[in-house]
Structure formats: structure tokens, C-alpha cells
């Protein structure tokens, strides 16, 4: 299958490191055959999630939902804010649930530290929605890991490229199996509960 990979950038800042590393990851994913899109949360400007207003008509939300439904797998890129994912990223995740089931997520973080708690929180949110997670992520310290010409230092670049390759390969495997489980009538599978 040609995997459709959606990068989601959770920084509201123009020219954010999250956005730059998400774009580099998607470029590398295309080299492995993925179709890619980047959803910048600072452009769709989602309303604050309110369960009382689930059917709200909002142009940015419509664009985000169309992209989420298009995707077979995701790369979530968040800044590290107080050891957490950004509010924009959490707000984005709150809008969706069944849409994430049977899809692989990979996590990248713009952080001055390792970003581990940030990625762990995104992993927890995704797990609650029966999304699958790549076991490792990539953290980038923007001010140190980009050189003066704007290139990523080689060690981080290599890790990001490995990450992109693994998201494409394992994302396709998981999506293919989930769809088979969804449509082949087997009952002893978690996917059965997502049949409509
Ligand atoms: C409100 C706020 C809180 C932050 N908290 C942390 C933090 O807890 N740990 C850390 O390593 N960096 C922290 N940072 C630094 C950002 O993670 C860092 O600047 C990152 O590159 C921002 O991502 P962006 O370039 O994608 O916007 C914080 C920055 C802001 C604005």
C-alpha cells in the first residue's frame, strides 16, 4: 500500500522548530514511498474543544478532520511546554477518537531537554484511542541541532530519517492488518468493535 502520512505540528509559533522537523520527516517519508501532508495547527486555528459543540461548523476544524480521515498514520510534532505537549496539540487530539484506531503514530518534540515526558503524554492520549505508537521518538533542541546554514546536525538527521522510514514501514503493516481485521468478519479481534 502507499501509506498516507499526516504530520501535525503543535506549535503556534511562525517558523517553529516543530514545524521544521515535521517537514524534514515528511520529506524523508516520501523517499520511502509515503504520500504526505502537513497540518499546521497555527493555520487551522481550531476552536477549544467543547463536547457540547461537537457538530460545530468551523472551517479549520473541517480541514483538520478531512486530513485526519485521509491519514493512515501520523507524525505528531509538539514543542515541550512545561514537560508537556502544547495546549494546541492536546486540543487537536481531543476532537478525535475512533479516527485514530488502528493507525500508527510517531512522536517528535522540539525541546531543550529530551522531550520524553512530552512524547509519553502524546503516546498516552493515542493509546486511549486504540492508536499504535512507534516505541521511540526524536527530540530536537532547535538552537543547537540546526547549524548556522539551517541544516540538522548529522546525528539527529540520521535518527529522524530512521524514524521516518520506520513510521512508513510499520505504519503500513498496522494499517493493512487493521483494515483486514475490520472487513474480514473475524470476531476475536479488537478491530471488530470499530465495524459500523
Ligand atoms: C511556555 C513555554 C514552556 C516551555 N517549557 C519547556 C520545558 O519544560 N522544557 C524544555 O526543554 N523547553 C521548554 N520550553 C522551550 C521550548 O520547548 C522550545 O523553545 C521549543 O523549541 C519550542 O518549540 P517550537 O520551536 O516548535 O515552537 C518552553 C517554552 C515555552 C514558550
Image (cartoon, rainbow, N blue to C red):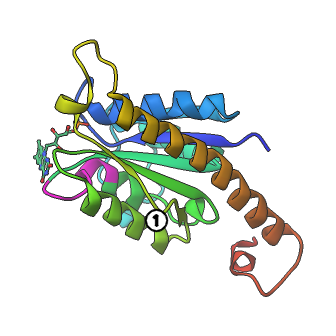
Give the side of residue 12 with respect to residue 168, left or right. left
**Residue lying at 53% horizontally and 48% vertically, measured from the top left:** 74
View extreme (top): residue: 149
Residue 116 lies in magenta, yes or no?
A: no
Give the quarter of the image for residue 124.
bottom left
Please say whether residue 44 is visible from this viewpoint. no
Q: Which residue is located at x 65 percent, y 55 percent? A: 170
How would you classify the magenta stretch by its main secondary structure? loop
**Residue 113 at x, y percent in the picture:** 18, 50
Residue 91 image offset from top left, x and y in percent: 32, 54
Instruction: Please tell me how many numbered marks the rendered image carries.
Output: 1
The residue sitting at 21% across, 49% down in the picture is 80
Q: Quadrant of residue 12?
A: top left
Q: Which residues are magenta?
A: 82-89
Q: Quadrant of residue 3 in the image?
A: top right
Q: Nearer the viewer, residue 70 or 137?
A: 137
Q: Nearer the viewer, residue 99 or 134?
A: 134
Residue 141 percent coordinates (x, y)? 22, 38
Task: Report which residue position mark 1 lands on.
Answer: 126
171 relative to 26, above or below: below
Front-most of 166 and 133? Answer: 166
| Magenta stretch holds residue 87 | yes
Q: Quadrant of ligand 1?
A: top left
Quadrant of the frame with the N terminus: top right
Q: Secondary structure at mark 1?
A: helix
Amino acid at each position: 500500500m502507499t501509506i498516507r502520512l499526516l504530520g501535525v505540528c503543535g506549535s503556534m509559533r511562525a517558523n517553529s522548530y516543530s514545524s521544521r522537523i515535521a517537514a524534514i520527516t515528511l520529506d524523508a517519508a516520501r523517499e520511502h514511498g509515503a504520500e504526505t501532508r502537513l497540518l499546521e495547527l497555527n493555520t487551522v486555528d481550531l476552536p477549544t474543544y467543547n463536547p457540547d459543540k461537537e457538530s460545530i461548523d468551523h472551517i479549520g476544524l473541517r480541514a483538520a478532520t478531512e486530513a485526519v480521515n485521509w491519514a493512515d498514520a501520523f507524525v505528531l510534532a509538539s514543542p515541550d511546554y512545561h514537560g508537556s505537549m502544547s495546549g494546541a496539540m492536546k486540543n487537536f487530539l481531543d476532537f478525535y477518537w475512533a479516527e485514530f484506531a488502528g493507525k500508527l503514530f510517531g512522536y517528535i518534540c522540539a525541546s531543550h531537554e529530551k522531550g520524553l515526558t512530552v512524547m509519553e503524554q502524546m503516546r498516552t492520549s493515542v493509546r486511549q484511542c486504540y492508536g499504535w505508537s512507534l516505541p521511540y521518538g526524536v527530540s530536537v533542541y532547535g538552537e543547537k541541532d540546526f547549524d548556522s546554514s539551517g541544516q540538522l546536525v548529522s546525528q539527529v538527521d540520521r535518527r529522524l530519517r530512521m524514524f521516518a522510514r520506520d513510521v512508513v514501514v510499520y505504519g503500513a503493516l498496522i494499517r493493512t492488518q487493521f483494515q483486514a481485521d475490520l472487513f474480514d468478519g473475524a470476531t476475536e479481534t479488537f478491530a471488530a468493535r470499530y465495524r459500523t
